[in-house]
Amino acid sequence: MARVPILMYHRVTPLPRGTTVPNHYVHPARFARHVDVLHRTGFTAISLSRMADAFAGRAEMPRRPVVFSFDDGYEHWSQNVVPVLATKGWPGTLFIVSGLMGKDNAWDNRAGDVREALMNPEQVRDAQSKGMEIGGHSVSHARLTKLDDAELARELTACRETLEELTGQPVPYFCYPYGAVDKRVRDAAAAAGYE
């Protein structure tokens, strides 16, 4: 089976003054170049769902597949990501913090970083209508390994339920905030309905 590169992004916007996480930023022009170079060199972007279906033998895998993954649900994706991918007919998977839609990334502000607006529900639906796949990224961007079992179940289940109600589609994929995951969290994600 083919290997599939997964390109993960956070913020696709100019680097602001005062950020504590400059490596989380990619300038929109650079992102557009990433997409153009991949397209010119024969890559085809696929969703995580199509990748899973291809690995399971339920779908064809393109000759040179690539997956675009975006964490946190930033509002600027509506201008700097979705249209760029949509012009190629390419999907991306947007991992949304369901309880903070229309608010901001307060979790980064606790670390002294710049606040950035997050997509509101209408922007999430619009992105989905333009070919983006929606995934879960918790209710509050909590560090899941630090939660008790009840809090963990709520962060996972409420996120999936909110996003499925919003989009009218299954939300089978989850991206762990901070990459914080262990066996207990993986088991809880599976119990909450994620693949």
Image (spheres, helix red, strand yellow):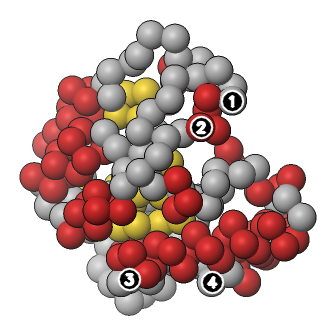
Residue placed farthest to the top in the image? 17
Can you give x and y, in whole percent of width and height, for residue 149 in the image?
A: 87, 71
Can you give x and y, in whole percent of width and height, for residue 99 in the image?
A: 56, 60
* In this picture, residue 142 sits left or right of residue 73: right
Kind of residue indicated by mark 4? Gly
Please say if the residues under marks 1 and 4 sit with CB atoms less than 8 Å apart.
no
Kind of residue indicated by mark 3? Gln
- Residue under numbered circle 4: 193
* In this picture, residue 6 sits left or right of residue 40: right
Q: Which mark is residue 169?
A: 3
Kind of residue indicated by mark 1? Arg
Q: Quick one: label 3, few (<14), some, or many (20+) residues within 10 Å? A: few
Q: Residue at x 59, y 37 (%)?
A: 106
- Residue under numbered circle 2: 106
Q: Point out the tag, 3 or 4, that comes first from the N-terminus.
A: 3
Can you give x and y, in whole percent of width and height, for residue 58 in the image?
A: 38, 89
Whole-number angstrom distance, CA of label 1 to CA of label 4: 30 Å
